[in-house]
Image (cartoon, rainbow, N blue to C red):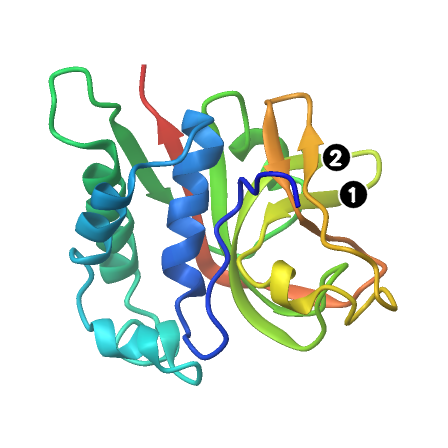
Amino acid sequence: MPRRWIYAQGDFDGACFLYSIGNAYVALRHKPADFARICAAMAQVEHPGDFLNGGVGTTGAYDKKYALLEDAMRRMLAALAGTDANAPRFEVARIAGPFETAMLTRSIGPRSVVILRYQGSSSRATGMDHWVCAVDYDAPADAVHVACSVALHRTGAAGAGAPYKEIFNERYGRWSNDALTKKRAHTVIEDEVFQVTLLP
């Protein structure tokens, strides 16, 4: 199989939130962090046991704790970036209130992606409560292209055995492996939408 750009989580963990942060880093930097930095980033997380349980994740200690979610993103991104003088810096900002997909036109750009939580179905997965990194938004098609940490394991669930595939989105030079569209019912969870920006 060709090189994968999108991190995939294990079978039993509930760490999609953490993987969405790692995938945001890859999307904005156009390269993965080295393993030592990934370990350092994971070590920044409070309540790590929640993420080892597939039935918990951010529905435990993180539930509706927006400042804690935002802090976890900041700390993980800083650890992924490293501490040298030329290390990239990131800004995290929560997009509060009712969510409309059109917001992504303003929130996703050459230096920004969006981490969001949705419930429902994507192009590749059914019945999810899941965090993903939105890397591009196709407004005419009303399709949110996402880097999803379970798409590798869910391949075939919605597509009768379709092989796993990562798609290169040319506008910003990022990879996606799933999409949120009107064809598959889903709801983006209000107040659990965050813009991540790579600072100049």
Tag 2 secondary structure = strand
Percent coordinates x, y for residue 3 in the rendering: 58, 39
- Residue 102, image quadrant: top right
Q: Residue at x 19, y 41 (%)?
A: 79
Give the amino acid at mark 2: Asp
| Residue at the image position 33 percent from the left and 36 percent from the top | 33
Residue that label 2 marks: 138
Kindly report the distance in space between the C-alpha atoms of the residues bearing marks 1 and 2.
6 Å
3 displayed left or right of 77: right
Q: Locate the C terminus and report the quarter of the image it occupies.
A: top left
Residue that appears at 23% across and 61% down:
68
* 29 on left or right of 122: left
Pointer 2 local density, CA inside 10 Å: few below 14, some 14–19, many at least 20: few
What x and y, as percent, mark residue 65? 28, 67
Q: Looking at the picture, tell me which residue is in the foreground, 62 or 102.
A: 62
* Identity of the residue furthest to the front in this view: 1
Of the pair 90 and 13, the residue shown nearer to us: 13
| Residue type, numbered disc 1 | Asp
55 left or right of 65?
right
Tally of numbered tags? 2
Image coordinates of residue 142 in percent, x first then y, are 78, 43
Label 1: how many Cα within 10 Å (few below 14, some 14–19, many 20+): some
Tell me: residue 115, above or below residue 63: above
The residue beneath circle 1 is 142
Instruction: Report if the CB atoms under discs 1 and 2 are less than 8 Å apart.
Output: yes
Residue 116 vertical placement versus 54 (above, below): above
Residue drawn 34% across the image and 70% down it: 64
